[in-house]
Image (tube, rainbow, N blue to C red):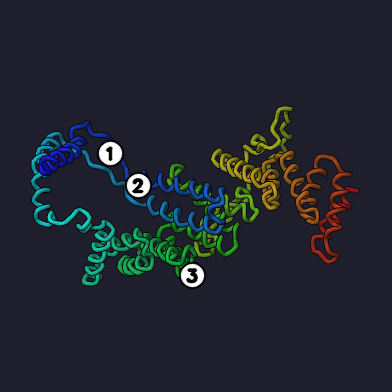
Amino acid sequence: MIWALFALMALAVVVALLWPLLRTPAAPAERAAYDMTVFHDQLAEVDRDLDRGVLTIGEADSARLEIQRRLLAASKLAPEQMHSETPAMRSLLTAGLAVVVPIAALALYMTVGAPQLPAGGRPQAGSDAQVAMLVEKLAAKMKAEPDNPEGWSLLARSYRQMERFADAANAYRNLMRLLPDDAGGYAGFAEASIGAAGGTVSAEAREALIQALRRDRDEPSAKFYLGLERAQAGDAKAALAIWRELTASAPADAPWMNMVRGQMAQVAQEAGVMPMAVQPRHALDVIGDGAPVAAPQSPPAAPPRAPAPQTAAADPAAPDVGAIKDRFSADNLEMIQGMVGGLQAKLAANPEDYNGWMLLGRSMTVLKNTAGAKEAYTKAVALKPAEAAPKAQLAELLAADGDKAGARKLLTEALATLPANAPQRAALDGRLNALK
């Protein structure tokens, strides 16, 4: 009876194996595309966990950085596609599986199995252990063949996939030694070093990133991590300049584009800087290591444009794209709207965020949305009435609309909050005198 059951099970397995061969072949699928979809879903899950309070901001930032590192690594891998077979090959493979699989399974079971033991007593081999064993064999081989660059490259990538970043960095050191002109080796070493340091860009990793860009100015991961290094150093504008150049020079369908833009929005919000107000610059030019470039020539000043008329149905919270459409590309306009929309959503959930209202006010000012900027600065004034900055910004908007009395009142209140030796007093005094 038991052998009949085994026979039925073997038949089921054979049918399962043959079924894909009997169907019409599907189009080849790319593994990299699947991996990147998973990584994007993981980034969205981190945001949901942060909103639910499952993660702290620091934990969410660390998780995002690790997922972004894997996304960049996946985007650089060559597409791995399933190969289609000829009809003759498929027929031969079908027949072979139908005959060989049951016989081979029985022979293997009788050779290495343990039918005399109860089911729970049989050892199981783990795939992770098998992979680790193969990697260790490769590492031993590289000790015997230390001048094999292909082997070091494979070992470095294997260690990186296993998240053994320190070992991956050592393997990349050998790759840099053997291929000193290969930008990928330097970028890989930097990425592994950053992973080993928990996401921090060390001085050694920074030098490797510079070396990568000296050999290939378009190496995307080197640009990204140099921007991250600037952000970690507190220089948000330099980071945004690097990332803006990265997104502007990359293909529009680059798989990591949304990830980089998300990082830009996060750094911009934390620093209170509007990304579109930062001039894109290559990473080597930002850090002063690239070849000197000529300063861009300023275009002739355009005649002043009349302000676009506001309709009664206009939404005061929406960006006035019509007022700025000639200043930015369509992609940048979409990014601006996405960033402002995301900021508005966060403020709706957390209306006590003073820095968020200040950033929204600056963003609306750049977008020429005066009503939205006034509303944002009014919220900031209500949250921190002892702060001079939101009152001064709101006064500028009122003065531009002709409400000089309201502007003078706000500037007077702003001056009253400042110490007598505050450096801002001179500027505010000048504005107040100009309104009299």
Residue 150, located in which quarter of the rendered image? bottom left
Q: CA distance from mark 3 to mark 2?
A: 31 Å
Q: Position of residue 434 (x, y in %)?
A: 87, 50
* Residue position for label 3: 203
Q: Secondary structure at mark 1?
A: loop
* Residue position for label 2: 32
Q: Which residue is most to the top?
A: 312
Q: Is residue 304 above or below residue 268?
A: above
Q: Tell me which residue sits at (88%, 48%) in the image.
A: 409
Q: Earlier in the sequence, mark 1 or mark 3?
A: 1
The amino acid marked with disc number 1 is: Pro
Give the camera-side residue of 168 and 116.
Answer: 116
Q: Disc 1 vs disc 3: which is toward the camera?
A: 1
Q: Secondary structure at mark 3?
A: helix
Q: Are marks 1 and 3 in contact (CB under 8 Å)?
A: no
Q: Tell me which residue sits at (13%, 54%) in the image.
A: 115
Q: Position of residue 66 (x, y in %)?
A: 45, 57
* Residue position for label 1: 28
Q: Disc 3 vs disc 2: which is toward the camera?
A: 2
